[in-house]
Image (spheres, rainbow, N blue to C red):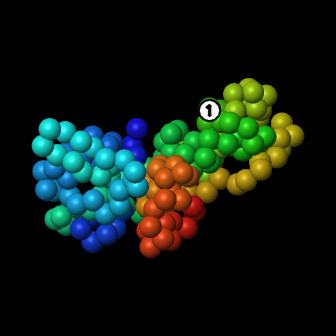
Amino acid sequence: MRDTLVLNASFEPLSTVTLNRAVVLVLQDKAVVEQAHPDLRMRGAAIDIPVPRVIRLCRYVRVPFRRRAPWSRRGVLVRDQHRCAYCGRRATTVDHVVPRSHGGADSWLNTVASCAEDNHRKADRTPEEAGMPLLRQPFEPTPADAMLLSLGAGEMESLPDWLNGQSAAA
């Protein structure tokens, strides 16, 4: 599970990493803990550090500019917060608004999270043809939004206000 946010030395979000990877970066003095879980600590024979929630790299990492977040099924489920776009129940699959057989693409604007029942019921039709209106329209998140959304709603609420404010879609 990726539950630790990594910031560049300039405080811009870079990625999310596992807790183990975050602790290794801190122990190697490659990163510092910017925010920790309030009551959790990692203890060993010679160490005692807070469990990191947000870490910042000590050295600036040049990242190629990304205009768009890469599309993925996991990304669509995270963007839609695992809620079905047709009924609002827990979503486990991704549905193409315009089916692939009708020329629909694997893209942010053509895919929504869906429960298995609604995905099966809609089948190879558009929402209008199936009589299943979308509860919310799909959107394309920015790369930073996609990464912050991957932390989940519980983690997003606990981020500092200055960082949480960067995300327009959250």
**Residue 14 placement: quadrant:** bottom left
Vertically, is 37 above or below 86?
below
Q: Badge 1, how many Cα within 10 Å: few under 14, some, many 20+?
A: many
Location of residue 38 in the rendering, given as x and y in whole percent from the top left corner = 40, 55
> Circle 1 sits on which residue?
93
Pick the quarter of the image with the C terminus: bottom right
Image quadrant in which the N terminus is located? top left
Q: Can see residue 114?
A: no
Q: Is residue 18 left or right of residue 142?
A: left
Q: Which amino acid, by three-letter code, is at mark 1?
A: Thr
Q: Image point 31% across, 47% down: which residue?
A: 41
In this picture, residue 56 sits left or right of residue 35: left
- Occupied quadrant, residue 101: top right
The percent coordinates of residue 97 (x first, y second) are 69, 43
Q: How many marks?
A: 1
Q: Which residue lies at the image location 70% right of the left edge and 33% below the top edge? A: 115
Q: Report the residue at 56% width, 52% height from top.
A: 153
Percent x, y of residue 139: 61, 57
User: Is residue 112 among the parts visible in the rendering?
Assistant: yes
- Point out residue 58 in the picture as x, y percentages from the top left corner: 18, 64
Residue 62 is left or right of residue 15, and the answer is: left
Vertical side of 141 occupied by 60: above or below:
below
Residue 11 lies left or right of residue 141; in this view the side is: left
Above-or-below relation of 97 to 57: above
The residue shown at (57%, 42%) is 77
The residue tagged with tag 1: helix, strand or loop? strand
Residue 131: quarter of image: top right
124 or 114: nearer the viewer = 114
